[in-house]
Amino acid sequence: MARIICFADNAAVTHAVQQGLDDREHTLHLLPASRLTNELRQAVQSFSPDLILLELSHGMDNPHLYFFLRSDYTTRNTPIIIVSPGARLAQQAEILEADGYLQRPFAAEQLLCAVSSFLTPLQALAA
């Protein structure tokens, strides 16, 4: 069972992630993406996630959250998948050195495909 954090402020993203991952044997934590607070930092550290989905959008300036996740000892090696509607998403993910990206809007199958390569090794270890 994987521990997944989804940072999103868009209701459509939150809903799609819940629909795509809730029926699986994963623990899903939904957290806001727009503000990096001390409470958010503590929550991330206590969850110790196996995978992170991070919504980036033009309406919010949250790359600081990405840099926190890459610098924090709990999450520095945790795979991060960027979720965005942006036309230059592949370039943005490459610049940030994200582990993957998912273009919005997306279907449940696309979400599962994006996360499965990161979760398969964890499922093998649990077996």
Image (cartoon, rainbow, N blue to C red):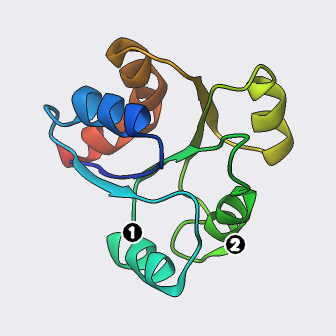
Q: Which mark is residue 48?
A: 1
Please report the residue visible at 33 percent of the width from the left and 18 percent of the height from the top. Answer: 108
Residue 22 lies in what quarter of the image? top left
Q: In front here: 19 or 78?
A: 19
Alpha-carbon neighbours of circle 1 within 10 Å: few (<14), some, or many (≥20)?
some
Residue ID for mark 2: 71
Given the image, on which type of amino acid does mark 2 rest?
Answer: Ser
Asked if the residues shown at circle 2 and circle 1 are in contact, with their CB atoms under 8 angstroms apart, the answer is no
Numbered circles on residues, count = 2
**Is residue 97 placed above or below 83 in the rendered structure?**
below
Q: What x and y, as percent, mark residue 31?
A: 40, 60
Alpha-carbon neighbours of circle 2 within 10 Å: few (<14), some, or many (≥20)?
few
Residue 12 lies in what quarter of the image? top left
Residue 18 lies in what quarter of the image? top left
Please report the residue visible at 15 percent of the width from the left and 40 percent of the height from the top. Answer: 25
**Is residue 125 placed above or below 63 in the rendered structure?**
above
Please report the residue visible at 35 percent of the width from the left and 78 percent of the height from the top. Answer: 46
Q: What x and y, as percent, mark residue 66?
A: 67, 58
**Is residue 114 placed above or below 68 in the rendered structure?**
above
- Horizontal side of 98 relative to 7 (left or right) equals right
Q: Quadrant of the C terminus?
A: top left
Q: Secondary structure at mark 1?
A: loop
Given the image, on which type of amino acid does mark 1 rest?
Answer: Ser
Q: In front here: 12 or 4?
A: 12
Give the residue furthest to the front.
59
Q: What x and y, as percent, mark residue 101?
A: 62, 30
Q: CA distance from mark 2 to mark 1?
A: 14 Å
Q: Secondary structure at mark 2?
A: helix
Q: Earlier in the sequence, mark 2 or mark 1?
A: 1
